[in-house]
Image: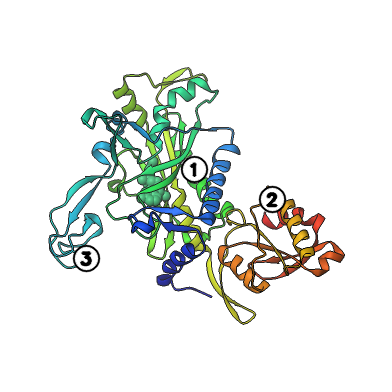
Amino acid sequence: MPVSREQLMDKIVALTKRRGFLYPSSEIYGGISGFYDYGPYGVAMKRAIRDLWWRHMVELRDDVVGLESTLIMPSEVWAASGHLTNFVDPLRQCLGECKKRWRADHVLGDRCPECGGPLDDARMFNLMFKTHVGPVEDRASEVYLRPETAQGMFVDFKNVVNSTRVRVPFGIAQQGRAFRNEITPGNFIFRVREFELMEMEYFVRPHHDEEAFDYWRKERLRWYTDVLGVKRERLRMYDHPKESLSHYSKQTTDIEYEFPFGWGELEGIANRTDFDLTVHQERSKQDLTYMDPETNERYLPWVIEPAVGADRVLITLLLDAYDEDVVNNEPRVVLRLHPNVAPVQVAVVPLSKKQELIDVAQRVQQSLRGQFRVEYDQTGGNIGRRYRRQDEIGTPFCITVDFDTLQDEAVTIRLRDTTEQERVKIAALPERLVTLTS
Ligand code: GAP
């Protein structure tokens, strides 16, 4: 049953809170705008997203290596990268009743969208969070929490080249927290102030950028459709016009998703040229050039960068999967998540609380644990209610242990999407689930 786009976000916000995916951060103290905590199912799902990204960007390839750099880096890094001067948004504040602050490019005209009061002139606001290292809070001790993970990969470029056997073209990938003091966080976890970035810098020979750019555009789109199961018709590629490019980019394509509030950026794929290595070489006065053993040339490689936030992937998957239908004359809410990303892949449910059934169900559960994300559910309520609870968190398979199991050593697999059921021998269960999952 189609769910109205207007209501969809509200329903997801309510479901994720009710079912333990996401909570407002520090809620008992009134919360803090733009920050969210991940509950048990949210964590499981976010970890799955990160693992699938790492698997496809690093482990399944022989040309990409990983890195974990620090969240705090010296100010020189951000001076060199241009973030100190360019990582800014235009800010306007209401001079009327509500005093609300707005991103100037998000409001039309000179009146506050909230209370209709006049807005002041736009001024530039840097989005980086500042703090100090050491006990003295002076200019010299100022540092910033990273707004992107990318700079760690540029600053460590020479270390990676010197300590491993990578050869251009190759990539360095990193996942980790990034912090942005967004003027207007919103649309739930679409725009937050602390989030998990997943970025890869792919180094190529100078001017060999076009081919790599095209390759990564296609490859990244494929990840969403084939690995995460996002509906193709809700995705599109958006090529940025020259005037809207970031300060470091020659060319950027966004993979966009059709969110309830309109098309929005899911992932950015940028052609950063040799911008970053050049500025770091200049400022650090270190030689960051690469000696190409094939061409015998020394150069600063160019860079293609796919970058995406895990939180934004998660909200996309939830919105994409949400559905309401009717089963046995009863309405149900169901998250049609791909088994790869479902927080629980298999729920094991004994039909009743009889000890014989519990014993078998726990044995089944143990045999699947480690291979799948498994939940054991013997809580009260009839079996239908338990199925519906699993539907609501997106569990693709429920395994029911019933009285026949005691005779035939077989269980029922109940499929979330069709609610169809099939009988399978316990011994054949893991193999059958692998087939159904892939
Ligand atoms: N190093 C390039 C870079 O950081 P970006 O377009 O600013 O590029 C990359 O960010 C991705 O990070 C976005 O496509 C989006 O998925 C995610 N992202 C950016 N800002 C975010 C925010 N405030 N909250 C959640 N995710 C965000």
| x 45%, y 28%: residue | 205
**Residue lying furthest bottom in this view?**
329
Percent x, y for residue 316?
Answer: 47, 58
Percent x, y for residue 119?
Answer: 14, 59
Question: Which sits earlier in the primary sequence, circle 1 or circle 3?
Answer: 3
Disc 3 target residue = 113
Q: Is residue 150 above or below residue 101?
A: above
Q: Quadrant of the C terminus?
A: bottom right
How many numbered marks appear?
Answer: 3
Q: Would residue 253 be seen by someone viewing this image from the given angle?
A: no
Percent x, y for residue 10?
Answer: 41, 68
Report if the beta carbon of the residue with label 1 is closer than 8 angstroms to ligand 1. Answer: no
The kind of residue on which mark 2 rests is: Arg
Query: Whole-Å distance between the Cαs marked 1 and 2?
Result: 35 Å
Dot 2: what SS?
Answer: loop
Disc 1 target residue = 216
Mark 1 vs mark 2, foreground winner is 2
Mark 3 vs mark 2, foreground winner is 2
| x 34%, y 40%: residue | 249
Dot 1: what SS?
Answer: helix
Q: Is residue 86 above or below residue 391?
A: above
Disc 2 target residue = 369
The kind of residue on which mark 3 rests is: Pro
Q: Counting other residues with Cα less than 10 Å from the Cα at mark 1, is it few (<14), some (14-19), or many (20 or more)?
A: some
Query: Whole-Å distance between the Cαs marked 3 and 2?
Result: 52 Å
Report if the beta carbon of the residue with label 2 is closer than 8 angstroms to ligand 1. Answer: no
The kind of residue on which mark 1 rests is: Trp
